[in-house]
Amino acid sequence: MLFRSFGRHSPASLFSAVLLFSGPASALDASLPPSGNFDLTHWKLTLPSGSEIQAEVLSNGYTLGNVFYTDPVSGAMVFRCPNLAGTTANSNYSRTELREMLDPGSSAHDDSNNWTPADGGRMKARLKVNRVSTTGESTKVGRIIIGQIHGPDTEPVRLYFHKKPSDAKGRIYLASESVGGSTFWSTDIVSNKDGGGVALGELFTYAITLKGTRLQVDILRNRGAVVDTYVKDIDPAYQGLNLYFKAGLYNQNNTGTSSDYAKVTFYSLTHTHP
């Protein structure tokens, strides 16, 4: 179900207590590494090579030139990923993407590092999509994932931004997999028809909230003056399974020229649990 509202609006959180915060405590400082502006102690980072940077290193000033770094003007956290690079074991696409680690000293597979639908979770990010791919197969060009909830083998939600070279602006939609692997594709949460959509370089906010089987995705634009909300039930078979958030840039184009890439910039990022 898709809902839209105009005017002042603050989507209600399902949670009254905050466990973790991963956003800037004050104004962003362009002289600091990402961990100087964002609390990254409960995240690890996957690089386009397929290698991982663990939370201890990531939160201790880690940067990688032209891949993961602080924007020199705004102080925001930049994720850049080429089309043609390495991948993780179970993917065909490259990424520069954070993986939530509730207990970063333990294995990512441990229960302590994850949460269940009964626990619930909410991730909120303020960001700009600066660039998407412009070359390659027509079904893949301009398509990225900017946020996920991941399960043991499948994803209850993947949030897409998609702008083809012929489009003036991008659209936002989601995919939700069943535990068995079948995929549901939503209608556009933000459509780019009739002059609508989100432009490259436009600041917007997304919030992904899951409690039980109820999934809600909110997209806030124009400083919250326009809110698009999508609500659906995920596969009930996820109940009792371990979940975790992912945020950043997961490039969904593995074709095109060697110089082609996507880039996103995060201005805030929070992940909360009751």
Image (cartoon, helix red, strand yellow):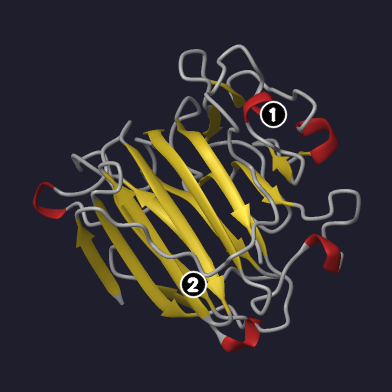
Front residue of this view, candidates 9 and 46: 9
Identify residue for label 1: 35
Determine the residue positioned at 91% across, 54% down.
106
User: Would residue 109 be seen by someone viewing this image from the given angle?
Assistant: no
Disc 2 secondary structure class:
strand
Q: Is residue 240 left or right of residue 224?
A: right
Front residue of this view, candidates 268 and 131: 268
Determine the residue positioned at 48% across, 51% down.
145
Q: Is residue 124 left or right of residue 219?
A: right
Identify residue for label 2: 176
Determine the residue positioned at 82% across, 57% down.
108
Q: Position of residue 20 (x, y in %)?
A: 69, 51
Q: Residue furthest front?
A: 16
Q: Position of residue 214 (x, y in %)?
A: 49, 79
Q: Quadrant of residue 89?
A: bottom right
Q: Position of residue 169 (x, y in %)?
A: 23, 42
Q: Residue furthest bottom?
A: 236
The quadrant of the image that shows the N terminus is bottom left
Vertical placement of 13 versus 221: above or below?
Answer: below
- Distance CA(mark 2)–CA(mark 1): 31 Å
Amino acid type of disc 1?
Answer: Ser
Amino acid type of disc 2?
Answer: Ser
